[in-house]
Image: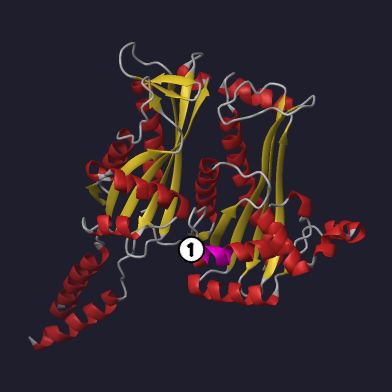
């Protein structure tokens, strides 16, 4: 009996380190929190498009990174939702490419309160800011502190915010195409989706602004129609473009964004 | 020598026990729709039972499954609509899942139905393309832990008889919808198996 004690103890010690793994546990790699997917532009897409985009971008991010996801759109935002919204708006307000005239009321009010209305109306300064596109910048100090605390709380290195600012369909030759998601026959029309993403380093509060813009010409639209059928609707097109944009966003983030704010 | 054999046997026994990980318990809720799908009487089709059945069949060896499709009430469907927007489990759904001792909750969404003419799969006839997404929530934390999407195509009319559905300008048979959803669900199941 006494001879068995040592081997038993040895076996227990050796196998104690073998932990049972949880399913769906976060993979190793750069830790990113998909903090918010929202629209701070004047023309907001319907919730179903935003939810589809959120699912697609979550999946593409989780293929490459150690991703945590949280709330996207909410009719009844929580306090934490408001905090993330504030961080997102602060990133937009300090960005190089922000255009006040294209933003919604909530964003313009926040931007004016943080930077002052004159900041955005000075043409010379606006042009100078545009030349700094791609260069990281800092958040407001109190927002940077908030980001640091949230980063610790969520155990992430970066936060990602997506502003799907504008999506529209219009006739190539002029005039507005009164598009609803079920409108069809896209020949001769252009589809536009514009979005920016903001990658925030939670330790430093530094932000990289990446811009994605999709303006498909009627030629490209006809190629898509040839592949998917004549009755490819506006809704289908917007979903298609958003999915395409999600892929480009993740690619851009991997190649430029992470290097810029690392 | 005897001592060595004893150590070896005990090591194998304990190692086998440690490595035999418990299968995760996944509660599979129904698939709801983000697009309007109606029958010819304009009644909304709210859930799609084919998809969860296919996913359960395919991942059965990778997880312990709880079929919650039969217990999905209108109230739970409303909560799922909220969850679709907030990205986390609401207390009501958490309670619903905990009652079945689930570790994870799988909820599906029909993202989009579109017309397609994919020559490789269905020849030159009109078809439909179904896009599905699945969100998996950790019941203990309420957080979303994974998202998977899948796509499937089918002819718009498979059989001459059977129910006809509409989504916008699109009209298709129930069989064709099920076929497209089946393909999409299969793609999602493969992704889930790789991740578990």
Whether residue A258 is visible here, answered yes or no, is no
Q: Is residue A83 magenta?
A: yes
* Dominant secondary-structure state across the stretch colored magenta: helix
Residue pushed farthest top? Answer: B160
Residue A92 image offset from top left, x and y in percent: 70, 60
Q: Is residue B135 magenta?
A: no
Please give the name of the residue rendered at 83% of the width and 64% of the height, measured from the top-left corner.
A119
Q: Nearer the viewer, residue B3 or A71?
A: A71
Q: Residues within 10 Å of mark 1 (few under 14, many from 20)?
A: few
- Relative horizontal placement of residue A119, taking residue A145 as reference (left or right): right
Whether residue A26 is visible here, answered yes or no, is yes
Residue segment shown in magenta = A80-84
Residue picked out by circle 1: A78
Quadrant housing the N terminus of chain A: bottom left
Please give the name of the residue rendered at 37% of the width and 57% of the height, measured from the top-left corner.
B89
Residue pushed farthest left? Answer: A1
Instruction: Specify how the rendered protein is coloured.
Output: secondary structure
A82 to B146, vertically: above or below: below
Q: Secondary structure at mark 1?
A: loop
Q: Nearer the viewer, residue A59 or B106?
A: B106
The quadrant where residue A151 appears: bottom right
């Amino acid at each position: 009996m006494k001879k068995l004690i040592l081997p038993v103890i040895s076996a227990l010690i050796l196998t104690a380190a073998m932990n049972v793994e949880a399913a769906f546990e976060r993979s190793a790699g750069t830790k990113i929190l998909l903090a918010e997917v929202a629209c701070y532009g004047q023309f907001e897409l319907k919730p179903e498009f935003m939810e589809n985009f959120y699912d697609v971008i979550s999946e593409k991010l989780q293929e490459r990174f150690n991703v945590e996801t949280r709330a996207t759109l909410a009719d009844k935002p929580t306090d934490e939702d408001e905090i993330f919204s504030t961080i997102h708006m602060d990133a937009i307000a300090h960005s190089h490419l922000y255009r006040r005239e294209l933003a919604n009321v909530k964003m313009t009010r926040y931007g004016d309160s943080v930077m002052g209305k004159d900041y955005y109306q000075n043409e010379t300064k606006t042009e100078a800011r545009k030349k700094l596109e791609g260069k990281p910048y800092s958040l407001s100090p109190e927002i940077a502190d908030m980001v640091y605390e949230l980063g610790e709380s969520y155990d992430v290195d970066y936060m990602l915010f997506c502003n799907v600012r504008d999506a529209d369909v219009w006739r190539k030759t002029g005039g507005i195409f009164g598009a609803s998601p079920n409108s069809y026959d896209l020949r001769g029309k252009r589809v536009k989706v514009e979005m920016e993403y903001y990658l925030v380093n939670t330790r430093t509060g530094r932000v990289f602004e990446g811009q994605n813009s999709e303006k498909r010409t009627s030629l490209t639209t006809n190629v898509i129609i040839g592949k998917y059928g004549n009755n490819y609707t506006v809704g289908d097109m917007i979903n298609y473009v958003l999915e395409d944009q999600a892929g480009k966003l993740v690619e851009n983030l991997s190649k430029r964004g992470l290097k810029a704010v690392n | 020598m005897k001592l060595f054999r004893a150590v070896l046997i005990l090591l194998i026994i304990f190692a086998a026990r440690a490595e035999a990980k418990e299968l995760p318990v996944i509660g599979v809720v129904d698939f709801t729709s983000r697009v309007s799908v109606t029958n010819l009487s304009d009644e909304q089709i709210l859930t799609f039972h084919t998809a969860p059945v296919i996913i359960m069949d395919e991942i059965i060896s990778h997880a312990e499954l709880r079929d919650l499709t039969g217990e999905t009430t209108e109230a739970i469907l409303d909560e799922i609509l909220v969850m679709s927007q907030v990205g986390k489990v609401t207390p009501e759904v958490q309670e619903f899942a905990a009652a079945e001792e689930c570790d994870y909750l799988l909820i599906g969404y029909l993202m989009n139905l579109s017309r397609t003419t994919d020559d490789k799969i269905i020849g030159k006839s009109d078809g439909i393309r179904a896009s599905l997404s699945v969100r998996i929530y950790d019941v203990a934390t309420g957080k979303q832990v994974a998202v998977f999407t899948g796509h499937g195509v089918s002819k718009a009319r498979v059989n001459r008889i059977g129910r006809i559905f509409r989504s916008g300008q699109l009209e298709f048979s129930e069989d064709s919808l099920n076929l497209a959803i089946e393909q999409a669900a299969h793609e999602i199941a493969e992704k889930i198996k790789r991740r578990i």
